[in-house]
Image (tube, rainbow, N blue to C red):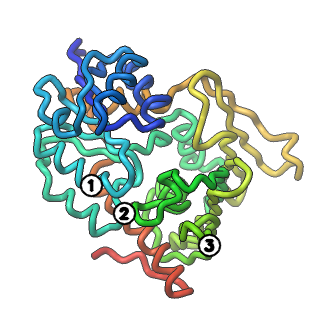
Amino acid sequence: MSNRKIRWGVLSTANIGLTKVIPAIMKSPHSEVVAIASRSEAAARAAADRLGIARAHGSYEALLADPDVDAIYNPLPNHLHVPMTLAANAAGKHVLCEKPIALTEAEAAQLRGADQRLLIHEGFMVRFHRQWQRAHEIAASGELGEVRLVRALFSYFNDDPGNVRNRADIGGGGILDIGCYPVTAGRFFFDCEPRRVVSLMERDPGFGTDRLASVIADFGAGRQLAFTVSTQLVPTQSLEIVGTRGRVEIVIPFNAPADGATALLVDQGASLDGSLARREILPRSDQYADMAEAFALAALGQGKLRWGVEDAIRSMRVLDAIAESEKRGGWIAVAEK
């Protein structure tokens, strides 16, 4: 395997980048972070100094023009995901974009016009974690019987009016911010797309964002995804894959710790309290680093990513249908356009 490395540039000093993704990219054997940009050169320099990054750019445009950058990590607010991803692609850069990749399916579809020789990947790091992969293996093995239900809960509390997650005009709200994770889980564990969805939402009276949302997605053949997400409930998360003879629970499904082992519970229902469930301990894994390494290898031509632009468009199609269900008050078909 080649010793070459992908040289990364980071668009913005967003907190998720500074605290999670950039340190993880730095762990990738085939990656190095060489530049970071902000609309404020002082902010970019402070972030660069903090993380040991060589170059700081005072504009996004300067970063995209940097000839020593091969790939861009785009953690900008949701409304800038597609515009800046397209700009980076036009500048000859591969792009790892934070989820959700767009505000709507129609916006995501613009990415089909990008240079297909360059990678564009939506950053669902959970799919690279061993706990998700192992849960998928168990579900596919037949141990659970016929898998009929994926059930999830994901919440945190944030009522800061200045936070981008509470700005409806730029893609804030629970469904786009964290509802995309259970949607990804349903598609991942059922290995197919939902046929229709129905949703119930409660909106913050001041922000206008969905702060509590529950969704059912019908995957056909008796298979359902059921989840609730909230931006204003006590922090918690859970994910179960349930079949006719057993279930798998991923103990920390979305924010798995990078510095410790994780666990799966495999339960055949021998005790209703779960005390007789089999506990599988999985070794320490940084899902962001694993995603960055897979991306870097694909960019170097030494691997292939399973998910690309078309997968991201299909994900947005489901999220669009969830939003439309709220408006219409009933089931919405998830139809390809």
Instruction: Tell me the residue at 60%/21% (across/down).
Output: 259
Instruction: Give the Cα separation between the discs numbered 1 and 2.
Output: 9 Å
Instruction: Tell me the residue at 47%/82% (across/down).
Output: 332
Percent x, y of residue 250? 66, 43
Report the residue marked by disc 3.
205
Per the image, label 2 sits on a secondary structure element best described as loop
Per the image, label 3 sits on a secondary structure element best described as loop
Q: Would residue 153 appear left or right of 116 to someone viewing this image?
A: right
Q: Would residue 188 appear left or right of 2 to someone viewing this image?
A: right
How crowded is the residue under tag 3: few (<14 C-alpha within 10 Å), some, or many (20+)?
A: few
Percent x, y of residue 94? 20, 38
Q: Which mark is residue 82?
A: 1
- The reply to whether callout 1 and callout 2 are in contact (CB within 8 Å) is yes
Per the image, label 1 sits on a secondary structure element best described as helix
- Foreground label between 2 and 3: 3
Instruction: Tell me the residue at 68%/49% (across/down).
Output: 238
The answer to whether any part of residue 31 appears in the image is: no
- Amino acid found under the numbered disc labelled 3: Pro
- Amino acid found under the numbered disc labelled 1: Val
Instruction: Give the Cα separation between the discs numbered 3 and 1.
Output: 29 Å
Report the residue marked by disc 2.
103
Q: Nearer the viewer, residue 285 or 190?
A: 285
- Amino acid found under the numbered disc labelled 2: Leu
